[in-house]
Image (cartoon, rainbow, N blue to C red):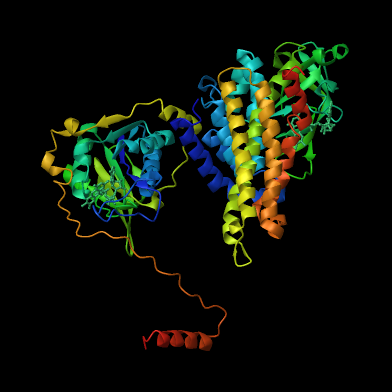
Amino acid sequence: MKIVVCIKQVPDTVEVKIDPKTGTLIRDGVPSIINHDDKTGIEAALTLREQLGGTVTVVSMGPPQADVALREALAMGCDEAILVSGREFGGSDTYATSGILAAALKKIGYDLIITGRQAIDGDTAQVGPQIAEKLHVPQVSYVEEVKEATEDYVVVKRQFEDGYHIIKIKTPCLLTAIAELATPRYMSVRGIVEAYEKEIKILGFEDLKDDLELDMIGLKGSPTNVYQSFTKEVKGAGTILKDLSADEAVKAIVDKLEEKFII
Amino acid sequence: MDFKLTKTQMLQQELFRKFAETEIKPIAKDMDEAEEYSAELLQKLQKIGAFGIPYSREYGGQGADVLTYTLCMEEMSKVDASTGITLSVHTSLCCPCINEFGTEEQKQKYLRPLVDGSKIGCFGLTEPGAGTDAAGVRTEARLEGDYYILNGTKIFTTNSGFADTFIVFALTDKSKGPKGMSAFIVERDSEGLTVGPNIERMGIRAASNCEVVYENVKVPKENLLGKEGQGYKIAMTALGGGRIGIGAQSVGIAQGAIDEALKYVKERKQGGKPIGKYQNTQFKLAECQTKVDAARLMVWRAATAKDNHDNYAPLAAMCKLFASETANEVTRVCVQLFGGYGYCREYPVERAMRDAKITEIYEGTSEAMKMIISGSMKV
Ligand SMILES: Cc1cc2nc3c(=O)[nH]c(=O)nc-3n(C[C@H](O)[C@H](O)[C@H](O)COP(=O)(O)OP(=O)(O)OC[C@H]3O[C@@H](n4cnc5c(N)ncnc54)[C@H](O)[C@@H]3O)c2cc1C
Ligand SMILES: Cc1cc2nc3c(=O)[nH]c(=O)nc-3n(C[C@H](O)[C@H](O)[C@H](O)COP(=O)(O)OP(=O)(O)OC[C@H]3O[C@@H](n4cnc5c(N)ncnc54)[C@H](O)[C@@H]3O)c2cc1C
């Protein structure tokens, strides 16, 4: 089975800053990591490979610096890594990103595609489902367990608001991974040595132009119009009242509400 | 000259740092209190390849360099010096004896499982009567047919509580002194080999360190390393490289203490401000960090020399001498910056100060390092 995992390199911080002028993320000076859900996806893919045989390919769209995220994936045990990169791709929103990744996936070939549910920076959870739509393959999002896997189909448990679904889905298909799906393994020392001996293939616009038009990608191909971006104001820490009787607690709350002219 | 790590080394460092923070730091205090190394942690370390870092992939090793090994030693020792010594005795005392002096058969049979992470090794040179003067070893090995018969007592054999493979030094010819010493590979389950209880210690208490008694232990002739009479040379070669690991362990202990102190002095307030705002605190930490950086550069220099097959032995002795004394000074200063809390078990600097002391003693005392260094200077 050929499994392809889409991984995104994201800044390692909860405090993502936004450039007030351009409305895009400021990535300089922030250490980068593989998006958590995507690392889970890598682990799930490696486990499936151990069961079924085959290969695991990781693909990331991003600037050349995404190289280190791909090396890390190789060091965890992935067989092959592909960087989708080019000036033409800059400024892409989720719609354009998924179009580019879909074109890359068509070129790479796949039996099973795994993406993370959501990236911790962009946070839209749109890219995985959009890729599936563009490739016309079935998809299951929020996968928390792979119950059974064969060359022809997979049976997965999908998290749902008030329960779960057990879904049998034909391959080729796309799954989006959540944290519950797997605990990512560590890289190994030898894996890192070998990751840097491998070559990372780069796919640019020229390689994908059979499936892409310039007006489908980059800022031009991005229908999302960011009206305004801003950094959320940090709220002060709350007050914790401890060791009070019920009556004292009620009084303390009422006093506070009165003090703030709420009641 | 370029003092930067390569991309590969940086990713290795990230692996070690993350592993140490997630898997070791939360249990280091408990292992110290229990005076027992976690078997589960050993397995996790084996899985990431921590036991075969600078060994060829041809023999199942990880295929990285000595410098990468020092990065591992530093990151692990930052949170737990016991993990440092456990890895170090295996990687840079036991394995080199086989890697550098073993036959192809010995490498396949004994080195492969040691460096691929399935077995653990130890190194028995020191005896109750032979410490700094390692030439004073009394353990004997008598050839009888296809076997050597070993008799003697080794003290302070690190990892012996759980190791599978023992490198043992014994006299095959008592009349020749150190020139009559030979090195053997001995399997743990050999009849007559008895490992005593863990020796109660001041520091690195989670590490395994026991007396090992050899009583008529039959060792197959083919387990002799090198030739008869080469034992002393083998021991000195292993120790010569091992000291780079102890240098790195010392740097880790010291850096770990500084990292803890940096956090603490920003939080702890006295006289209306964080103690980090006092110039004394700032200058003390500046001095500590400067010394640790110098020690680290010395460790990297010795490691690079070993990677390049240059004459590393005096560089290794210098880095061990300087780094171990730095670790002791820095941990003492850090405990001082913590005040009374630094003296309490709750804070990791207390353990760091206890752990630091051993670095000035094992794999050759500071005094022994000065003998080696002055010897290389032809004083
Ligand atoms: C108007 C607009 C303009 C933007 N302009 C820029 C810009 O100029 N520069 C810029 O860097 N970003 C820009 N972005 C952000 C960019 O759209 C997102 O990084 C990208 O589309 C992924 O979306 P997300 O982060 O919400 O991922 P999600 O949809 O939350 O991610 C889900 C999963 O999809 C996969 N995935 C997502 N992105 C990638 C990827 N790049 N490679 C491989 N797999 C991936 C991962 O598996 C991930 O877990 C812009 C976004 C908008 C809305
Ligand atoms: C926790 C721990 C782990 C160890 N692990 C191992 C191991 O795995 N394998 C192993 O073989 N050994 C191991 N050792 C032994 C260690 O290497 C010795 O303890 C060390 O070499 C010192 O020997 P000694 O204890 O006999 O001290 P001694 O040699 O008796 O030294 C006592 C003091 O005298 C000084 N001294 C001795 N000779 C001279 C001299 N000629 N000139 C000036 N000063 C001198 C020393 O520097 C020291 O200060 C370990 C020891 C400990 C405590």
Task: Please provide percent x and percent y for residue A168.
Answer: 28, 48
Question: Is A79 placed above or below A126 here?
Answer: above
Classify residue A239 as left or right of residue B109: left
Classify residue B341 as left or right of residue A217: right
Task: Please provide percent x and percent y for residue B307.
Answer: 56, 21
- Quadrant hosting residue B314: top right
Q: Quadrant of ligand 2?
A: top right
Residue B178 makes an appearance in the image: yes
A162 or B197, nearer to the observer = B197
A41 or B314, nearer to the observer = B314
Residue A191 makes an appearance in the image: no
| Count of numbered circles on the image | 0
**Residue at 68 percent of width and 46 percent of height:** B331
**Residue at 30 percent of width and 49 percent of height:** A176
- Quadrant hosting residue B108: top right
Image quarter in which the C terminus of chain B is found: top right
